[in-house]
Image: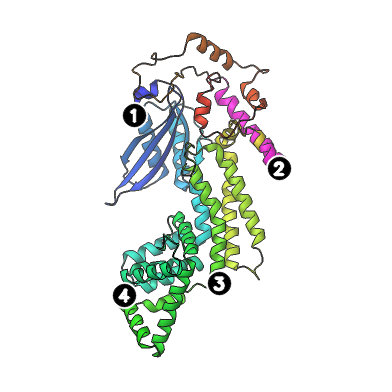
């Protein structure tokens, strides 16, 4: 690994996190991301260290520094992408003090890139479960681990509205093999064209499952409504002692399956509940789409990894989506006030992180360096906010001037395919001398021929670019 890092002088970017194993041991993981001497993206786990002591930012910073020293990367540090936990801010501030002690330049604020996937997670959880979603997570885990009665767990979810009631219904159906078989028979009778009849159970920690559960519920809605309606009416008749023989037998079977079977009577979905679920689905679909796109887990197999250049456009689109939803569902006489409050809460949280983009120059610069967006993206999308355009343009230009304009890189080695092995020396496959000289000339910009400005003024329209790294690798006469 050290020899690979020595083969080129690109910066190395990092992501890190703490993890607790099933046997309750804490570990700290640091992953490196860099462009190799052939111009290909590389990712490697640089350290998976046993973490002892409190999870403070200082302890994390000291561990990061130890790993940087191990690979001789102290002068090659680029950006750190982490989730939005407060101790990650502290970790980078403490790391900045260590860099200062070694007289190495490092800006802990500008070097921090907030994981936008985590931002989406926080926004969705706030929308679904409120600002106290951490309490719900802890309560659900505690009740389930303690062997608490089903009734208490069902009551916990029921307080969360239509989605909580759907969760209870799906758990109730799937908990009993006999009930699951009866439900399958009913769905196949009512919806013979349906092949996926099993209801899905979402959970509070992984919201994609909630979206999937809602979508599946609408696919089998007729079967769900009919099955729950029958179970509720049979339970009511059983309580009144008026059930006919077959109904008594059926009710008896349910009671044997589930001692708390009567609890389902409080979870029957009304028309208003289904309308709430429909709104929730419409709110979450764009958030899920962007979440998958930025993970590269989308239906377009030709796309590479999610790009940082898409974070600003994603924020713009999702904020506009939530702002439209605030207007569309604003009437409390028509829509559930809980839904209205949830939309406002989600918008406020996303807007909070949007306001922090000025502290992340990499986000603006990534847009400016995208061949299909450039600085013109801000001019087109932010027409009503000229001060925003000025800020974004200034931040991107200043980063170029400070970190890249006078930094010459001439070690890119031509390669049609990614190398199967790392060359033993940087001389293997180096560029012809004329090519190196051309790159050096292009790197020596003056005030009249700034390379960044030339790129911005180039009006050539690029088609959709599935792989930005490949695009820049193919433009070797653009050395940075």
- The mark that comes first in sequence, 1 or 3, is 1
The residue pinned by badge 3 equals: 271
Q: Circle 3 sits in a helix, a strand or a loop, which is it?
A: helix
Region rendered in magenta:
378-407
Query: Residue 217: where, in percent of width, then height?
Result: 47, 64
Q: Nearer the viewer, residue 353 or 302?
A: 302
Q: Circle 1 sits in a helix, a strand or a loop, which is it?
A: helix
Image quarter in which the N terminus is found: top left
The residue pinned by badge 1 equals: 70
- The mark that comes first in sequence, 1 or 2, is 1
Left or right? Give the position of 387 relative to 147. right
Query: Residue 175: where, in percent of width, then height?
Result: 34, 68
Q: Nearer the viewer, residue 105 or 121?
A: 121
Query: Residue 111: where, in percent of width, then height?
Result: 50, 35
Dot in front, 1 or 3: 3
Left or right? Give the position of 42 relative to 318. left
Could you give the CA–CA distance between mark 4 and mark 1, rounded to whole angstroms? 59 Å
Q: Nearer the viewer, residue 361 or 210?
A: 210
The residue pinned by badge 2 equals: 385
Could you give the CA–CA distance between mark 1 and mark 3, rounded to whole angstroms? 62 Å
Dot in front, 3 or 2: 3
Q: Is residue 297 above or below residue 394?
A: below
The residue pinned by badge 4 equals: 257
Q: Circle 4 sits in a helix, a strand or a loop, which is it?
A: helix
Neighbours of disc 1 within 10 Å: few (<14), some (14-19), many (20+):
few
Q: Circle 2 sits in a helix, a strand or a loop, which is it?
A: loop
Could you give the CA–CA distance between mark 1 and mark 2, rounded to whole angstroms? 47 Å
Could you give the CA–CA distance between mark 3 and mark 2, rounded to whole angstroms? 42 Å
């Amino acid at each position: 690994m050290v020899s690979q890092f020595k083969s080129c002088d690109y910066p190395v970017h990092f992501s890190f996190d703490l993890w607790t194993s099933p046997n309750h041991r804490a570990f700290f993981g640091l992953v490196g991301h860099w462009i190799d001497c052939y111009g290909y993206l590389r990712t490697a786990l640089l350290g998976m260290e046993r973490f002892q002591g409190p999870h403070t930012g200082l302890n994390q910073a000291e561990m990061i520094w130890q790993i940087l020293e191990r690979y001789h990367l102290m002068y090659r540090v680029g950006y750190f992408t982490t989730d939005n936990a407060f101790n990650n801010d502290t970790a980078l501030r403490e790391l900045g003090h260590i860099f200062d002690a070694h007289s190495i330049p490092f800006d802990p604020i500008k070097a921090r890139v907030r994981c936008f996937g985590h931002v989406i997670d926080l926004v969705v959880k706030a929308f679904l479960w409120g600002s106290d979603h951490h309490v719900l997570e802890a309560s659900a885990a505690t009740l389930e681990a303690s062997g608490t009665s089903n009734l208490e767990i069902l009551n916990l979810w029921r307080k969360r509205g239509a989605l909580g009631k759907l969760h209870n219904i799906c758990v109730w159906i799937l908990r009993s093999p006999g009930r699951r078989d009866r439900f399958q028979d009913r769905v196949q009778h009512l919806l013979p064209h349906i092949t996926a009849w099993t209801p899905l159970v979402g959970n509070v920690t992984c919201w994609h499952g909630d979206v999937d559960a809602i979508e599946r519920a609408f696919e089998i809605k007729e079967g769900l409504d009919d099955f729950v309606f029958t179970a509720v009416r049979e339970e009511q008749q059983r309580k009144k002692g008026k059930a006919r023989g077959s109904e008594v037998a059926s009710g008896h079977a349910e009671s044997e399956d589930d001692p708390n079977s009567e609890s389902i009577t409080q979870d029957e979905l009304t028309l208003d509940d289904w309308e709430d679920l429909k709104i929730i689905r419409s709110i979450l679909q764009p958030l899920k789409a962007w979440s998958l796109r930025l993970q590269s887990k989308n239906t377009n197999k030709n796309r590479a990894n999610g790009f940082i250049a898409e974070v600003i456009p994603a924020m713009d689109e999702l904020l506009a989506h939530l702002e439209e939803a605030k207007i569309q569902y604003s009437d409390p006489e028509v829509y559930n006030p809980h839904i209205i409050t949830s939309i406002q809460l989600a918008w406020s949280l996303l807007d909070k992180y949007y306001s922090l983009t000025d502290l992340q120059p990499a986000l603006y610069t990534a847009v400016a360096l995208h061949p299909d967006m450039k600085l013109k993206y801000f001019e087109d999308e932010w027409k009503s906010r000229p001060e925003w355009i000025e800020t974004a343009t200034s931040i991107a230009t200043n980063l170029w001037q400070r970190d890249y304009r006078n930094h010459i890189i001439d070690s890119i080695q031509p390669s049609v395919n990614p190398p199967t092995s790392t060359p033993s020396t940087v001389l293997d496959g180096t560029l012809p001398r004329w090519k190196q000289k051309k790159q050096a000339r292009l790197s020596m910009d003056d005030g009249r021929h700034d390379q960044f400005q030339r790129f911005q003024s180039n009006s050539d329209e690029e088609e959709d670019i599935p792989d930005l790294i490949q695009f820049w690798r193919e433009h070797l006469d653009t050395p940075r």
